[in-house]
Image (cartoon, grey):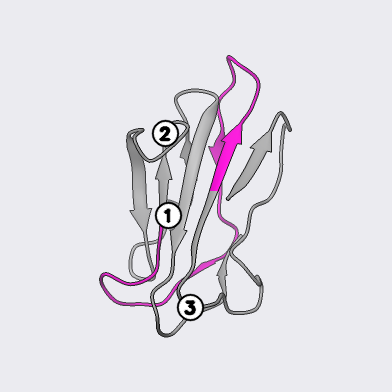
Amino acid sequence: AYNINGSSNGTLASPNFPKPYPNGQICSWSITIATGSKISLNFTTFLLQSGSDVDSVQVFDGSDVKAPSLGVFSGVHSPPSQGLLSSGNQIFVLFKSDSSNSDKGFE
């Protein structure tokens, strides 16, 4: 788990990026910025294992997995090119990889 607090910009990436991420990973990022601000999340690279029910990134509009989902993204369903925008000052990102195959990941 990673906590990112207060910075006006930053980068998050899958483990080992730009090399392939490991199998069997569960990683999370909790991002909080100044109250009254919103978070714009853009992926410059997004390459996950193709297929259904495999590796995924889910983005939540709040501080944890109980917040509304902004989307679940995978090798067959990429995040929107215009990025994602939070409704408030927090966002939570959850990455899961299964036990086989991997790809370059994301940044």
- The residue at which mark 3 appears reads as 23
Using the rendered view, name the quadrant where residue 41 is placed: top right
The image's mark for residue 88 is none
- Which of discs 3 and 2 lies nearer the camera? The answer is 3
Mark 1, residues whose alpha carbon is within 10 Å: few (<14), some, or many (≥20)?
many
Question: Of label 3 and label 1, which has the lower sequence position?
Answer: 3
Front one among 48 and 1: 1
| Mark 3: amino acid | Asn
Which region shows up in magenta?
29-57
- Residue at the spot 64% in from the left edge and 27% down from the top edge: 33
- The residue at which mark 2 appears reads as 61
Tell me if 78 is positioned left or right of 20 in this view: left
- Residue at the spot 40% in from the left edge and 84% down from the top edge: 100
Mark 3, residues whose alpha carbon is within 10 Å: few (<14), some, or many (≥20)?
some
Task: Please tell me whether mark 2 sits on a helix, a strand or a loop.
Answer: loop
Q: Main secondary structure of the magenta part?
A: loop
Tell me if 56 is positioned left or right of 46 in this view: left
- Residue at the spot 36% in from the left edge and 77% down from the top edge: 50
- Is residue 62 a member of the stretch shown in magenta? no
Tell me if 78 is positioned left or right of 19 in this view: left
Using the rendered view, name the quadrant where residue 69 is placed: top left
**Image x and y of residue 72, in percent:** 34, 53
- The residue at which mark 1 appears reads as 79
